[in-house]
Amino acid sequence: MEREGRIIKSISGFYDVLDHESHELVRTRARGNFRKRKIKPIVGDMVTYEASGDLGYILKIEDRENSLVRPPIANIDQAIVVTSSVEPNFSSNLLDKILVNIEHNDIEPLIYLTKTDLLDDDKYADLKVVLDGYRKAGYVVFDGRDSYSDDQVQDLIKHFADKITVFTGQSGAGKSTLLNHIDPELGLATAAISQTLNRGKHTTRQVSLFNIEGGLVADTPGFSSLELIEIDQEELPTLFPEFVQYSGECQFRGCHHVNEPNCKVKEMVENGTIMKSRYDDYLYFLNEINSYKKKY
């Protein structure tokens, strides 16, 4: 009998599927014709399968809403961008690059600031002003004075229900510490991964999804691609939500918000509605994309 579910773990050619109706976990294999068609099931895939005895077989993989290569995971709803305030220092350029990549993958980003307790009050107040700019741009931001307070972690967990969540951010930003506060099992999983990765570059990684507060959370410490190669200059302005908000009022359709006259986005940068740092990063990324084009 055909059933439906979602792959929540893959290991050595076996796929553990969480059944939609019974909520039981069923170990499956992929039918041989997937290999012939060069299709590989990955964690997060919605599948149709049949179960007979101890082992089921995947018959069909539903179309993916999105997917990542590192780590291999599909149908992600949101990414928690773990951002350090210090050690390593906060970088709006790096944060904006991560946000652009996440938006490009049709994933919703949430920004989570760590190590706030290491800042003095003045520096913390300055950083709050910057992060309020991200709120105005439409992002959900967690930037409390105590990064790992129970209240703030609980507020974050409320966003997990009915979603698949991954974590990302610069190394050393405190992803594992945050994951430990959410669920010690997740923290343990990521610590084991870090050790494995440090031992050998070619270690293959298994990804698992953990059930937390009615949602599924990946045990991976984040995805690594920060190249803008896949993004072209037409798409880039659509990956800044606050640009999208005002671009309809630009004089020209398809305005790049650079040299065009009567550009509403530039007007909003000048009057402080859109953060200048975001606009400067946009120009920087545009330049980077154009230099890729020349190279290839």
Image: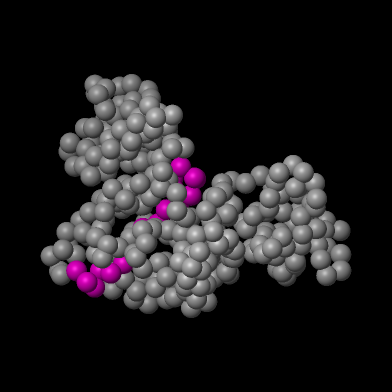
Q: In the displayed structure, does residue 123 sit left or right of residue 203?
A: left
Q: Position of residue 153 (x, y in %)?
A: 40, 72
Q: In the displayed structure, does residue 76 sit left or right of residue 264?
A: right
Q: Quadrant of residue 103?
A: top left
Residue 64 vertical placement versus 80 (above, below): above
Q: Position of residue 264 (x, y in %)?
A: 26, 30
Residue 151 vertical placement versus 229 (above, below): below
**177 or 278, nearer to the observer:** 177
**Which residue appears at 49% of the width and 45% of the height?**
105
Quadrant (top left, top right, bottom left, bottom right) of the C terminus:
top left
**In the rendered picture of this protein, how many numbered marks are placed on residues?**
0
Residue 123 vertical placement versus 231 (above, below): below
**10 or 165, nearer to the observer:** 10
Residue 208 vertical placement versus 277 (above, below): below
Is residue 113 inside the magenta stretch? yes
**Which residue appears at 36% of the width and 58% of the height?**
170
**178 or 241, nearer to the observer:** 178
Q: Position of residue 34 (x, y in %)?
A: 76, 47
Q: Quadrant of residue 16?
A: bottom right
Magenta region: 102-119
Quadrant (top left, top right, bottom left, bottom right) of the N terminus:
bottom right
**Which residue appears at 74% of the width and 57% of the height?**
4
Q: Position of residue 222 (x, y in %)?
A: 46, 59
The furthest residue to the left: 122
* Residue 222 in view, yes or no: yes
**Which residue appears at 62% of the width and 46% of the height?**
64
Is residue 295 inside the magenta stretch? no
Q: In the displayed structure, does residue 250 sit left or right of residue 157?
A: left
Q: In the displayed structure, does residue 275 sit left or right of residue 150?
A: left
* Residue 183 in view, yes or no: no
